[in-house]
Image (cartoon, rainbow, N blue to C red):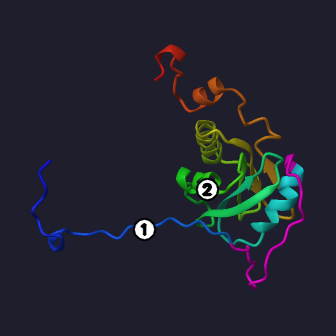
Amino acid sequence: MPRSTMPFSSVTTTRVREFVCAYRPLRDAEGHVVSLPTLVLNNPETAARALTPLLAQEPVEVFAVACLSVRKRLLAWHLCSRGTRTGTQVSMPDVFVPAVLTPGTTGLIVLHNHPSGEVTPSPDDVAVTRRLQLSALILGLDLHDHLIAGEAGQYFSFREAGLLGTGLEEIVAACGATQAPLSARS
């Protein structure tokens, strides 16, 4: 096998970077560590009571993900986006990277606030929820709920409202696609 005669010093180099995932305590606006009681977030009311206060004081719309264990205990919390008083952009990688990288995550609850205090979901909220559900399905994660936090402890749960589809056909249809027969998949 022939060897290269190019001197080593003329080869360009690139520094190799290592991805390091670290966790730190969540802090409030005054810098105090936020603590939550160890709860099983197995229903929308419990999840809303535990999680919506984390968004209560936000003057703009924010979108967050709560990573849950198989027993639906909170493993990690991640603020995905911060927007304006009327909306925020939601990126699927920004939602799912924390879930995939948090050891033990089997499911998630996504939530966002409506600074207006009104918890009724917009058509965009419904569309994002469908995309999130399809993405979670592809990644083998459970999307347990999408909560909208309003004022005075009010919340909207997509799960309670029956707006989270349960079958692949329903999710795919809601996204406007058709499901290929099993024999045609690769």
The amino acid marked with disc number 1 is: Arg
- Residue beneath the point at 72% across and 45% down: 106
User: Tag 1's secondary structure?
Assistant: loop
Q: Is residue 177 left or right of residue 57?
A: left
Q: Position of residue 27 (x, y in %)?
A: 74, 77
Instruction: Please identify, in this view, whether the residue under mark 1 or under mark 2 is nearer the observer.
Output: 1
- Residue beneath the point at 73% across and 81% down: 29
The answer to whether residue 30 is above or below residue 132 is below
Q: Position of residue 72 (x, y in %)?
A: 82, 49
Residue 101 tag number: 2
* Range shown magenta: 24-44
Q: Position of residue 93 (x, y in %)?
A: 53, 53
Q: Position of residue 162 (x, y in %)?
A: 78, 35
Labels 1 and 2: the sequence-earlier one:
1
| Local crowd size for mark 2, using a 10 Å CA cut-off: few (<14), some (14–19), many (≥20) | few
The amino acid marked with disc number 2 is: Leu
Q: CA distance from mark 1 to mark 2?
A: 17 Å
Residue 17 tag number: 1
User: Tag 2's secondary structure?
Assistant: helix
Magenta part mainly helix, strand or loop? Answer: loop
The answer to whether residue 78 is above or below residue 33 is above
